[in-house]
Amino acid sequence: MTDFIDSFDDEDPFDSASLRLTVDLTALTENWKDMARRSGKARAGAVVKADAYGLGIEDTGEALFLAGARDFFVATVEEGVTLRPYAPDARIFVLAGIWPGTERRFFENDLVPVISSEEQLAFWMAVLAEYGDYPCALHVDTGFNRLGLSMDEALALADDVSRPASFAPVLVMSHLACGDDHPSEMNRQQLESFRQVSAAYEGVDSSLAASAGIFLGSDYHFDLTRPGIAVYGGEAVNGMANPMRPVVTAEARIIQVRTVKAGETVGYGRAMQLTRDSRLAIVAAGYADGYLRSQSSGGVPMRQALPQGGHGFLAGRKVPVAGRITMDLTMFDVTDIPENAVRAGDYVELFGKNVLLDDVARSAGTIGYEILTSIGLRHERRYLFEEE
């Protein structure tokens, strides 16, 4: 009996998982190197917030560090603490800034707070008065009207001769509201505003461009760029062919293949009525796994705007979603695939090299960012990396 149980130790859980996620770290690092080249004279950082856009901050962070990234951006102090062992010599900027009670984690993990408001600035000055010199970054709002000191606040701070000598920011940054829309006049307006800020903080590194801004050209690069979605293979600019390599493939196992007669309906709300005798593959993925309900073939508001729902990929061809996507299950119409080419236990690609991430996003009425960051916890993950 013991030998029988021990035999299971050799099984790879990825091979039998209901949901599989393959992350190509070679493609990820090549994408980062591509964005670093496009950044010209500027250094390229790496944005790994939201658990590296859903792909795992530990593995992706380490791969990017080994590829040469030395400036990382996370959303929260908790993310920075998680990343630190995997990027030991890097600067890690925490975009949410510092708040009372988080000081110890910043200092113990050598994290750099991004100061975005007068309230945070006042607290940070008090921290410096107690603990002494420590680096920070300043986030300035140049028209986005999200986070950031106002232009007036930032320029006044730069000219404030009474500010303590211990207050010495290492980075001043802003964020483009319309970077993905290159013709937008907003980009040029924000650039001119940020140039004023950068000039006011002479000698301090400046950063304006995330992925989309990098594609706007050298005027937007300054000293440090912040590529994010492009590193993960997503589209950064509207209307432009995506030059990045796909990084992630999501697959779901077929639990059952069933035959359904013409005229019958499929799933909740009888959202789809079949016009022919059909075969349906029922797979183990649903909106609990980030496969969004809005991709359903019918019975959801998105189909009133866009007639076509989502697709998977199986046996060399795309297969459409049938009916509504549910919490744990999705039905795909596999009628046009030969019967001997589809069986229970096979896997349907939900997105990857054959069904592109941003095509899935469009069918769901959203963006690739949301698809990636919605990936659930039930995927068994495999990280691929080619040693040089």
Image: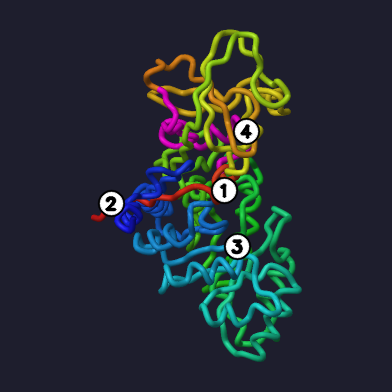
> Magenta segment, which residues?
342-368
Give me the C-alpha separation between circle 2 and circle 4: 33 Å
Q: Amino acid at mark 4?
A: Ala
Q: The residue tagged with tag 4: helix, strand or loop?
A: loop
Whole-angstrom CA distance, mark 4 to mark 3, is 26 Å
Residue 376, which numbered label? 1
C-alpha gap between disc 1 and disc 3 = 19 Å
Callout 1 touching callout 3 (CB < 8 Å):
no
> What residue is shown at x 58% (from left), y 31% (from top)?
330
Q: Please provide percent x and percent y for residue 215.
A: 49, 45
Residue underneath mark 3: 75
State which tag comes first along the sequence, 2 or 4. 4
Q: Earlier in the sequence, mark 4 or mark 3?
A: 3
Q: Is residue 359 magenta?
A: yes
Q: Is residue 352 above or below residue 49?
A: above
The three-letter code of the residue at mark 2 reads: Glu
User: Considering the numbered disc 3 on the image, is that residue within a helix, a strand or a loop?
Assistant: loop
Q: Secondary structure at mark 2?
A: loop
Q: Position of residue 265 (x, y in %)?
A: 66, 17
Estimate the spatial distance between the alpha carbons at disc 1 and disc 4, rounded to whole Å. 17 Å
Give the residue pinned by disc 2.
Answer: 386
Q: Residues within 10 Å of mark 3 (few under 14, many from 20)?
A: some
Q: Nearer the viewer, residue 72 or 169?
A: 72
